């Protein structure tokens, strides 16, 4: 009985729109929850040169979350190897975890040095995701590479805030 139910579940495939909603919804939820738990930066910190206005930062992060979610969905759709598809999504989830936790360390706990290390791990996970997505579906890999460049910019800002405020 359990084997029959298991095979029925495995044979049932989600519609592409449902997969898209799940991947995009979870990604946006992670981004929103991360910003919620992170809060805002202490206004007393000196900012490094090239620091954007708050509204620019929020807008770019929202665009980034939508873009990486679409990249994950496109990779999921393009890759028919179920094991690779699963592993791609696991790495994507690991990356989202690093992304989710960074605002907590940086904004809420003001752990500026630790945030640099955490963001470096986030960048490494993004590079792994970019490589995996690139192999599965070229446009998705390119999207993640562009997003990773934004993470390097965030790394610069994190380092700048730490150096200017020690």
Image: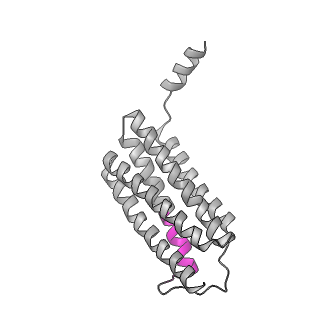
Query: Is 61 contained in the magenta span?
Result: yes
Coloring scheme of the render? one colour
Nearer to us in this view, 157 or 113: 113
The rendered magenta stretch, by its main secondary structure, is classed as helix
For the image, the number of numbered tags is 0
Magenta residue span: 51-64
Placement of the C terminus among the 4 image quadrants: bottom right
Q: Residue at x 68, y 64 (%)?
A: 37
Residue 30 vs residue 109: left or right? left
State the image coordinates of residue 72 (x, y, percent, origin top left): 44, 50
Residue 78 horizontal side relative to residue 6, left or right: left
Q: Residue at x 55, y 57 (%)?
A: 98
Q: Is residue 141 left or right of residue 29?
A: left
- Rendered residue at 40%/59% (across/down): 144
- Membership of 15 in magenta stretch: no
Q: Is residue 56 above or below residue 78?
A: below
Where does the N terminus fall, quadrant-wise?
top right
Residue 66 rendering spot, x and y as whole percentages: 49, 59
Up-down: is 97 above or below 51? Answer: above
In-front residue for pair 148/30: 148
Q: Nearer the viewer, residue 150 or 98?
A: 98
Q: Residue 109: x percent and y percent?
A: 68, 70
Residue at (44% x, 41% y) in the render: 87
């Amino acid at each position: 009985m359990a084997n029959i139910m298991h095979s029925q579940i495995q044979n049932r495939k989600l519609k592409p729109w449902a997969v898209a909603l799940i991947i995009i919804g979870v990604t946006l939820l992670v981004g929103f929850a991360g910003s919620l738990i992170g809060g805002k930066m202490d206004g007393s910190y000196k900012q490094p040169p090239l620091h954007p206005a708050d509204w620019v930062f929020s807008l770019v992060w929202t665009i980034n979350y939508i873009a990486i979610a679409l990249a994950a969905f496109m990779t999921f759709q393009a890759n028919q190897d179920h094991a690779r598809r699963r592993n791609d999504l696991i790495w994507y989830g690991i990356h989202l975890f690093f992304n989710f936790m960074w605002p907590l360390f940086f904004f809420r706990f003001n752990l500026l040095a630790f945030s640099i290390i955490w963001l470096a791990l986030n960048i490494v996970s993004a590079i792994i995701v970019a490589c995996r997505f690139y192999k599965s579906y070229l446009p998705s890999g390119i999207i993640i590479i562009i997003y990773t460049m934004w993470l390097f910019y965030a790394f610069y800002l994190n380092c700048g805030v730490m150096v200017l405020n020690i």
